[in-house]
Every structure is written in C-alpha cells, then in structure tokens.
Image (cartoon, rainbow, N blue to C red):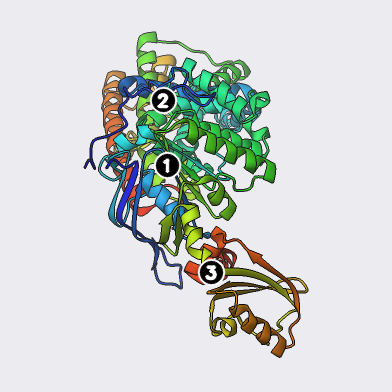
C-alpha cells in the first residue's frame, strides 16, 4: 500500500532549558504515534491546545526531528530524505504573519512561488486564479501589512495551494478568522481535495465542527497520544448506542460533583461546567433509563432542572468519552499548568 | 528509505478542475537544481530592492545620520591639522560602515528575525537551499547599501571638498568586489549561528558592532596599530578592503597603507573562498542541529 503519510512509533520529547532557579526538564509532546494516511484523504488531527498536533506537523514537514520512530511523507523518510519530501509538500499555519509587509499580496506570493521553482508566468496565473477563488483578487496590489487578519490568512492559504503540493499541511487554518471567513476557507479546502483526488491534506484543528465537516478521517489526539482514528461518522456511531443528554440546572454550589453522577448505574461520563447563573451537565448514558437516577440525585440535592435536551453524538462527545473531560476543560487545565 | 513505489511521479497527469488546478491540467512543472537556486536568489533579493524604493526613510536615517559621525572626525582632523587625505579616509570609511551595518543587522541576525516572523520555517520547508536565500539577501542588501554608501560618498565629498586621485580603476573595482564577497560571506557564515539563537541575538550583534568600528579602521588608517593587531584585524574583510581602497584613491594612500594592494587582494581572495565555503558547511550543520533541537520555530524550547 502506498501511503501519503505514514508514521511508525513516532515520539518527540523537548528538552526545556532551566532558568536560574529551575532545573532543565523534559516535555513529552508525542508518544508512539502510528498513522497511515492514503493519497486523496483529507485527514484531521483533532485535539486541544498542547496535544501535540503542531509537533506532529513540524516533524512531517521536516522542520523538527523526531526523538524516536519514523515518518514518511509522499513515500520518503522525513529525516533521511528531506530534500525529496520538500518539493512535494507545503504548509499553512493559522495566524502566521509570513512574507514582508512592504510587498504587495501578489509580490509576496510570487516570491514564495519562486522558492518552489515555479516559472513566473505559471506562478502569476495560479496566483491570479487562486486569489479569485478565495475572494482576494481586489487586494492583489495591496501591501500585505495593510491586510486584516482574515485577509492575510487567505493570502497564506493561496501561498500553500499555489505550488500544487502532493501533501498539504494546514495547521489550524481558521484560527482567528470570523465565522464567514472560516466558512469560506473550509469550503475552499474541501473543494480542493474533492477536485484533486490524488492530493492529500492533513489538517489540525481544535474546532470539532471543522473536523466533523471537513475530514474523511480524524485522529483524536491528547497529551501526545492518538486515542482514536476513524471517520467522524464511525467515531460518532460508536456512541450512538449510548444516550447523550445536555442538562441545564441551577448552580451546584459544591453540593454535587460529576464523580457523583458517574458513580450512578448506567452513567458512562458526566461533565459539569458552571456557567453564569446556571450549570451545564453533559451526560453519556448506557441507556436512557439511567436518567432517572440522575434526576433523583438532582432532586435530593435540591438542584432544579432548567432544561433537558437529548443530543445526537458529536465529536465533542467522542472526545469526552475518550478523555473524560471536554476539550475546553483540558485546555483550561493546560493553561493553569503553564501559569 | 522508501516505503514503497511512489505514486507521485511528475509525469502523472490529472484532469483539470474548476480554477484550483494548475493551468496545464497536471502536476506543475517545477524547476530544480541551478534554475531553482537562481530563482531563489532573485526572489529573495526582491524585497530588499523593492523595499528600498518604497520606504525612503533610509535617506535620512541611513545617509544623513551617519554623515554626522563623519563630520565629527573631519572636524577633529581639521582641528589638529592632519593631512587633507585623512578627510577623504573618513568619508570613505563612513560609506563602508553602511556595508558592515547591513551585514551585521541585515545578514547575520536576519535569520533570527525571519524565525520570529514565521518565514524561516517556510524557507527551510521549501525545496530551495538556505544558502540561496542568504545569497539573495546578500545581493539585495548589497544593492540597497551601495546606494546608501554612494550617497554618503557624494555628499561627504561635496561638503568637505575631498580630492581623489584614483591609481587604478580595475584594481579598485576588484578590491571592492572581493571585499564585498568576503564580507557578505562572513555574514552568511555567522548567520548560521543565529539559527540556534533566540533573544540573545540582539546582544551579540550589538557586541560585534563597535569593536569592528575600531579594528577595521573606519575613521583612521590601521597602520597606526602594531603589525600584529593590524594582521588580526585583517581577518575582518572590511579592514583589508578599506585599506586597499584608500591606497588606490588617495595620493598619500600608499604611504599610509598596511601592506601593498596586491597582497591585500590575495588576502581578500583567500578570505572570500574561506568564508563562503565555511558558510555552506556551517549552514548545513546548523540547520540539522536546529531541526534536531527544535529551534527553527519555537524559541522558548
């Protein structure tokens, strides 16, 4: 089988230099990642900030060496044959400010096209066409320093696609974009893959909807480990035998915890998130009957049930089932840890 | 190591689709080898050349302000009744400082700024070589700095009535070109160190700035040093270049020169070759090291 991307027990550990008072320490960013992605796939890496998604992309784009394990892109080893990998790939990162502010959009794109050996005429043709596709053709001669974040990201998207790579890496491509711009970018990404059946696209995101809407297959990654890898529909189907409920209740104020609900028979997962004036309680139940126990527990603690909704499973539910916490909670914990 | 037969052969032709396909309907033809190298050099020099035209604040900051330093030394030499050629020495030295500043801030530490901006990762990830990128930066920088240096020389010569007596145009041209090749080669070599540096890059550049002002003899002939200090200072390409140029353009130049112009040309040839070869190997080594240690994109790690 020819894989567009393949990794084998890929691991990466960062050595973090110590300060004046602290010792150097190690940070495990990836652990034993095994992936096989076929040509033509739009593959998503879904995980919270700090899960290891960007580290994996950096390794695959030859910017970072793995600590152990191997990775191949377009059939070539990223460590031993980077010179063969590089002409076949490109990457776009969300929020990047690449290029030079003094140059216009067209000039910046032309400059990067030259680094890939495109002739000026082909490059200019591609730039013109792609700027039209992403709705940026009226800004062709605008200096890139004058572009808004969204427009700049569209320019970056064109930079990634104009070289017609075999494998394209998009690292949080809609980061910082408004809803409309994100939708346009997602539409463009999907149509590019649909229209180019042998091109492969790897996308990292921490937006569940983005992964669900775009990807043929998704790997859910947390703390450097791939926890599950399948199509979004298969991942969700595994949860369909279970009932997913979304409850809005009066504030617990410490009287109940999610562990209390998880101890009830038939409750697989319970995630409690205090909000402004009410609390949210997301439940994954083995069967609907288990809800009776939940309601009884709420009543016995004098907690009022404000709203109850049964949901179709989403990738967020899959993540909760795998990790035991919502992605938001994982990110909040990570932020607290860094501080 | 190959996984298996590669499905990405360039001859593979794909159907044309709505506007997102290459214009020829298949994989794009991409140049490689020397063509790619040349394209990269031209493309990377472009922002510097164009930037020069679009932001004209350099005329004030990089031409008129350096002239103030030149004025200081000119008035000192006039006050002590130094030979009139010393005025010319200062003007030429003031112009050459522009090249040193460009190499220091626009070449050596440039890769650090590129890293901060996010361009370095895109450069490394592209199929072109970092050496070609640096050569493009060097040529672009050389072009824009030559304009600045020329303005300093023209204005300085007009203000202070500097008299030139050029002994040999061909030797002067050869010395200038060799000095620039060696100087920018030195810049390319040291830029590899900045692949691994983060915020300390700023301090290192600052540290290198002033001593070179002294040891290169920007404002006085290096013959005033002892032989050995002058010899060590000659490892900086500007030292020999400046000394040779002064010998070639001023009447009293040869009497104040460190060694003869032919010897200085030979030294500059050697320095050019050594710095360019060293730059190539150091860049390759540092790039590998930076990839291994994860320094190409993350500064905090």
The answer to whether the residues at label 1 and label 3 have Cβ atoms under 8 Å apart is: no
User: Residue at point 64% right, 23% down?
Assistant: A141
Q: Which residue is mark 2?
A: B40
The answer to whether the residues at label 1 and label 2 have Cβ atoms under 8 Å apart is: no
Residue A154 location, x and y as percent? Answer: 60, 35
User: Residue at point 68% right, 24% down?
Assistant: A138
Q: CA distance from mark 2 to mark 3?
A: 57 Å
Q: Are marks 2 and 3 on the same chain?
A: no
Front: mark 2 or 3 = 3
Front: mark 1 or 2 = 1
Q: Which residue is mark 1?
A: A41
In the picture, which quadrant includes the C terminus of chain B? bottom left
Q: Residues within 10 Å of mark 3 (few under 14, many from 20)?
A: some
- Where disc 1 sits, the SS reads loop
Q: CA distance from mark 1 to mark 2?
A: 31 Å
User: Residue at point 36% right, 42% down?
Assistant: A38
Residue A132: which quarter of the image?
top right
Residue B42 location, x and y as percent? Answer: 44, 21
Q: Is residue A36 left or right of residue A169?
A: left
Q: Which residue is mark 3?
A: A242
């Amino acid at each position: 089988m020819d894989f567009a991307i393949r990794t084998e027990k890929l691991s990466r550990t960062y050595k973090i230099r110590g300060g004046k008072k602290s010792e150097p320490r190690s940070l495990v960013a990836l652990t034993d990642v095994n992936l096989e992605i076929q040509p033509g796939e739009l593959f998503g890496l879904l995980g919270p900030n700090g899960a290891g998604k960007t580290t994996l992309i950096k390794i695959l784009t030859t910017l970072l060496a793995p600590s152990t394990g191997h990775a191949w892109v377009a059939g070539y080893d990223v460590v031993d044959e980077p010179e063969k990998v590089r002409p076949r790939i490109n990457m776009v990162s969300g929020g990047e400010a690449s290029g030079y502010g003094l140059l216009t959009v067209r000039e910046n794109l032309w400059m990067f096209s030259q680094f890939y050996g495109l002739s000026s005429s082909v490059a200019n043709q591609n730039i013109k066409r792609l700027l039209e596709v992403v709705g940026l053709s009226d800004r062709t001669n605008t200096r890139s320093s004058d572009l808004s974040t969204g427009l700049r990201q569209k320019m970056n998207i064109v930079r990634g696609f104009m070289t017609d790579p075999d494998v394209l890496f998009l690292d949080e491509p809609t980061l910082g974009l408004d809803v409309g711009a994100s939708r346009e970018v997602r539409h463009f990404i999907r149509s590019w893959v649909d229209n180019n059946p042998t091109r492969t696209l790897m996308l990292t995101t921490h937006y569940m909807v983005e992964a669900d809407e775009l990807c043929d297959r998704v790997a859910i990654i947390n703390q450097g480990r791939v926890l599950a890898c399948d199509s979004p529909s298969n991942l969700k189907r595994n949860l369909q035998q279970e009932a997913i409920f979304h409850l809005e209740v009066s504030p617990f104020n410490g009287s109940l915890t999610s562990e209390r609900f998880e101890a009830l028979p038939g409750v697989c997962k319970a995630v409690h998130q205090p909000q402004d004036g009410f609390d949210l309680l997301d439940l994954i139940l083995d069967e609907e009957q288990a809800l009776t126990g939940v309601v009884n527990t709420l009543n016995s603690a004098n907690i009022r049930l404000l709203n109850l909704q049964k949901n179709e499973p989403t990738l967020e539910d899959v993540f909760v089932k795998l990790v035991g916490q919502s992605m938001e909670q994982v990110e909040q914990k990570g932020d607290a840890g860094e501080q | 190591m190959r996984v298996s037969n590669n499905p990405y052969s360039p001859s593979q032709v794909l159907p044309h689709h709505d506007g997102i396909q290459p214009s020829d309907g298949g994989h794009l033809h991409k140049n490689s080898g020397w063509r790619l190298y040349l394209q990269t050099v031209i493309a990377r020099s472009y922002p510097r050349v164009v930037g020069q035209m679009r932001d004209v604040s350099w005329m004030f900051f990089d031409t008129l302000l350096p002239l103030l330093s030149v004025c200081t030394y000119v008035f000192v030499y006039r006050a002590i009744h130094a030979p009139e050629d010393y005025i010319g020495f200062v003007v030429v030295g003031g112009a050459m400082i522009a090249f040193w500043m460009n190499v220091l801030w626009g070449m050596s530490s440039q890769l650090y700024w590129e890293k901060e901006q996010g361009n370095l990762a895109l450069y490394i990830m592209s199929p072109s070589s970092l050496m070609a990128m640096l050569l493009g930066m060097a040529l672009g920088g050389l072009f824009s700095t030559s304009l600045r240096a020329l303005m300093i020389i023209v204005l300085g010569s007009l203000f202070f009535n500097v008299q030139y007596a050029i002994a040999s145009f061909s030797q002067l041209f050869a010395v200038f070109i060799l000095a620039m090749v060696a100087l920018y080669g030195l810049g390319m070599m040291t830029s590899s160190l900045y692949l691994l540096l983060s915020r300390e890059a700023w301090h290192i550049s600052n540290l290198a700035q002033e001593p070179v002002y002294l040891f290169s003899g920007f404002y006085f002939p290096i013959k005033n040093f002892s032989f050995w200090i002058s010899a060590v200072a000659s490892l900086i390409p500007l030292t020999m270049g400046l000394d040779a140029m002064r010998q070639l353009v001023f009447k009293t130049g040869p009497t104040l020169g460190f060694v003869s112009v032919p010897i200085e040309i030979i030294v500059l040839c050697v320095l050019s070759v050594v710095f360019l070869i060293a730059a190539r190997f150091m860049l390759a080594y540092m790039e590998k090291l930076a990839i291994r240690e994860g320094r190409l994109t993350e500064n905090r790690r």
